[in-house]
Each structure stands twice: as C-alpha cells, then as structure tokens.
C-alpha cells in the first residue's frame, strides 16, 4: 500500500487562479497537476498511489468555515482522497470548528505557521493542541523554511522541541523531514521524539546521506511518504523513498504502512 501523506487540492472554481499565484510566490515553482481533485486522482492512478491526504490551510482567521466545509464535503466524494481541515490560531471559532471536523469524521488539521504568521510555540496555540489531543485528531505542520515566505521562520526545530510535551502524542506530523533546509537541527533536537515526519518536497534538496542518518536516528516507524503535490511529482516522491535502500519492512512502512496504522486502515 502506498499513501501520499502530503498533497494539496483546490475547489475546481479556484484552482486555475490559485496555482499561478502560489507558483509566482514560490519563485515560479512548477505545478505537476492542475490543482484539482480530478488532477490528483489522475496522478495517483499513473503512479500507483492508493490514498492521498489533502491538506488545506486557513490562511486568514475568517477562512475556517469555508476551508472546513469543503473538506467535509470531500469526505464522501472519493474514499481514496483523505481530506484534512484547518483552523487559524487567531480565529474566534477554532474550538467549534475542530468539534465540527471531528464529528464529521475528518481525521486531522493542517497548520502553516509561516502563512498563518504564528509561531508554533506561541501560547495562543496551547489550547488548540490540548483540544486536538482530546479529540484524537492528527496535527500536521509545515516545518522549517518556506520557499515562498521571507524570514523569520516560525516553525524551527527548536520551537517544536520547546513544546514537544504539548503536541498530540504520536499524532503530530512535521512536514519536509521535520524542517525544510534545517535538517541538522532536526536531527540534533527532534530525533528520537514522538513526532512523525513526512518526506515531502525534500528529494531535490536533501542529501540521501542526510535522509538515511535521520531515518536511522529517528526510526523508520515515524516517517510518512509525502510528495507536496502539485508542487512535486508523486512518482518521484515514491522513488525518493525507494532509493534510500531501506529494508523491505522499513520501506513498506514509510511508503504507506505507518500512515495506514495512523488512520486505522490496517
């Protein structure tokens, strides 16, 4: 089983406008699908992906309901697409929105500290983390530098290490091998913790030796294959894992077994 834990889609009415804007912000980064659910489904079929997690982001405090309503609507559309919601930490309705998502069966939420302009260790986040733990929901974070956002970096490995006891135990996922382009710090302060890391958007930027070192120190049971589609090809993300030379058991776990266990699919 292969599960891509890190993809993005947009409503059909917004995809054609959203992709060029986001691409420009990221230095004319190429998109590898059209940004729609249908485009992702096509990519999955071409690359042997069994399930994809779709991560939404509430960029503004006023976007919670719109983002989460779309995620809830997608639950029944295609069981192979697993939608996550999002809450903005400075919104007034984050508590009720988390409850609405959980009641509908949405498994988790995505935070993007750079887009949401909130440090992960800001005390404003603590009640949100507590509520996620109460609900048994998964928290996914963009972690590290963002290719399209100027400093300061609000999601450094040290920030996560400072609050590691507050983050949902065994259900907190840091994208991009725990912190994009901050991998030495990830290994230094986060390796061996309860946090899960996804592999998204790292293949062209992170040395294979650095990947292997971090997997060895942190444990292959805490890694989830991710692509960051449409911003990276799903097939290449799969190959990035296969090229590491892990044991068959560890490779299978990273490609999908760990995510399947997290979702209760196995």
Image (spheres, helix red, strand yellow):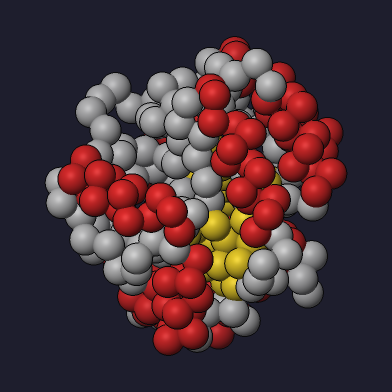
Report the number of discs.
Answer: 0
> What's the residue at 38%, 30% (across, down)?
114
- Examine the image and state in which quarter residue 241 appears: bottom left
Q: Nearer the viewer, residue 58 or 205?
A: 58
Is 115 rendered above or below residue 16? above
32 is higher (above) or lower (below) than 129: below
Check the picture and name the quadrant holding the C terminus: bottom right
Q: Is residue 265 left or right of residue 31?
A: right
Q: Position of residue 44 (x, y in %)?
A: 48, 78
Q: Position of residue 238 (x, y in %)?
A: 42, 76
Does residue 177 appear to the left or right of 124 in the view shown? left
Q: Residue furthest front?
A: 13
Quadrant the N terminus occupies: bottom right
- Expressed as whole percent of the image width and height from the top left, the position of residue 183 reads 34, 46
Task: Judge by depth and name the residue closer to the eye, 124 or 83.
Answer: 83
Confirm whether residue 216 shows in the render: no
The reply, left or right, for residue 184 in relation to residue 172 is left
Residue 45 placement, left or right of 259: left
Residue at 57 percent across and 61 percent down: it is 53
Q: Residue at x 26, y 33 (%)?
A: 149
């Amino acid at each position: 089983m292969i599960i891509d834990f890190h993809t993005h889609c947009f409503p059909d009415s917004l995809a054609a406008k959203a992709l060029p804007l986001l691409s420009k912000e990221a230095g004319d980064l190429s998109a590898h699908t059209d940004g729609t659910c249908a485009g992702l489904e096509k990519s999955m079929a071409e690359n042997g992906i069994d399930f994809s997690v779709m991560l939404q982001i509430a960029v503004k405090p006023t976007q919670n309901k719109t983002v989460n309503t779309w995620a809830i609507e997608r639950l029944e559309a295609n069981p192979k697409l697993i939608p996550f919601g999002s809450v903005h930490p400075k919104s007034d309705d984050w508590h009720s929105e988390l409850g609405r998502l959980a009641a509908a069966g949405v498994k988790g939420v995505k935070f993007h500290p750079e887009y949401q302009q909130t440090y992960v260790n800001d005390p404003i986040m603590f009640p949100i983390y507590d509520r996620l733990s109460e609900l048994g929901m998964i928290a996914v974070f963009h972690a590290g530098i963002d290719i399209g956002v100027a400093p300061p970096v609000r999601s450094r490995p040290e920030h996560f290490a400072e609050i590691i006891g507050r983050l949902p135990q065994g259900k907190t996922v840091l994208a991009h091998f725990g912190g994009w382009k901050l991998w030495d710090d990830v290994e230094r302060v986060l390796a061996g913790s309860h946090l899960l890391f996804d592999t998204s958007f790292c293949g062209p930027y992170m040395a294979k030796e650095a990947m292997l070192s971090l997997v060895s120190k942190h444990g292959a049971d805490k890694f989830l294959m991710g692509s960051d589609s449409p911003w990276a090809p799903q097939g290449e993300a799969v190959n990035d894992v296969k090229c590491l030379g892990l044991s068959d058991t560890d490779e299978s776990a990273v490609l999908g077994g760990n995510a399947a266990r997290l979702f209760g699919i196995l």
